[in-house]
Image (cartoon, rainbow, N blue to C red):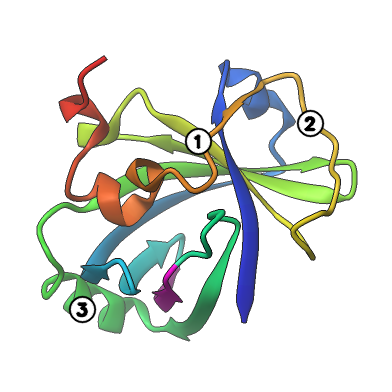
Amino acid sequence: MIEIERKFLVLSDAFKTEAYNVTRITQGFLNTHKERTIRVRLKGDCGYLTIKGESSKNGLSRFEWEKKITIKEANQLLKLCEPGVIDKMRYEIKVGNHIFEVDDFFGDNEGLIVAEVELENENETFQTPNWLGKEVTGQIKYYNSQLSKQPYNTWKS
């Protein structure tokens, strides 16, 4: 139940041709406190309720608990969420022994493309695809819970 992941910006849309799965995701947040985030997600034809704990100091790991719920339950819970819904397309790409999840955002976060790779331990090595850019692991502004409150289109360059 500990999630270990690294997060990166994406340099180009070359990842799209490498994806083996593409899914539309809509998500909202019942709570965006830094010590606990409660997320409601519609992913394809499934709903999910996820609770995440506070990130470690290096931003690599945190507690994560997720439960599959019905679409009806997810839609009802989305009505209770804080303002700022996240809408994105997720591309799953196998690179070596790992799966990169690349999120291409819509709406107020359009133009932002972020890749994540989950690891078994914090020191695990992985292959880096040529479209992978600057690492942003631990930078809170790239967390979806923060993008719902301070979307990408409000950032100053």
Task: Tell me the CA gap for discs 2 and 3.
Answer: 37 Å
Residue 22 at x, y percent in the picture: 57, 44
Residue 25 at x, y percent in the picture: 40, 53
Mark 1, secondary structure of its residue: strand
Q: Earlier in the sequence, mark 1 or mark 2?
A: 1
Boundaries of the magenta span: 46-54
- In this picture, is 155 found above or below 40? above
Tell me the tag on residue 128: 2
Q: Are marks 1 and 3 in contact (CB under 8 Å)?
A: no
- Residue type indicated by callout 3: Leu
Q: Residue at x 35, y 23 (%)?
A: 111
Q: Earlier in the sequence, mark 2 or mark 3?
A: 3
- Residue type indicated by callout 1: Val
Write down the residue under mark 1: 114
**Quarter of the figure that contains the N terminus:** bottom right
Residue 87 at x, y percent in the picture: 31, 46
Tell me the tag on residue 77: 3
Near-viewer residue (67 or 72): 67
- Residue 109 shown in magenta: no
Is 33 placed left or right of 47 in the picture?
A: left
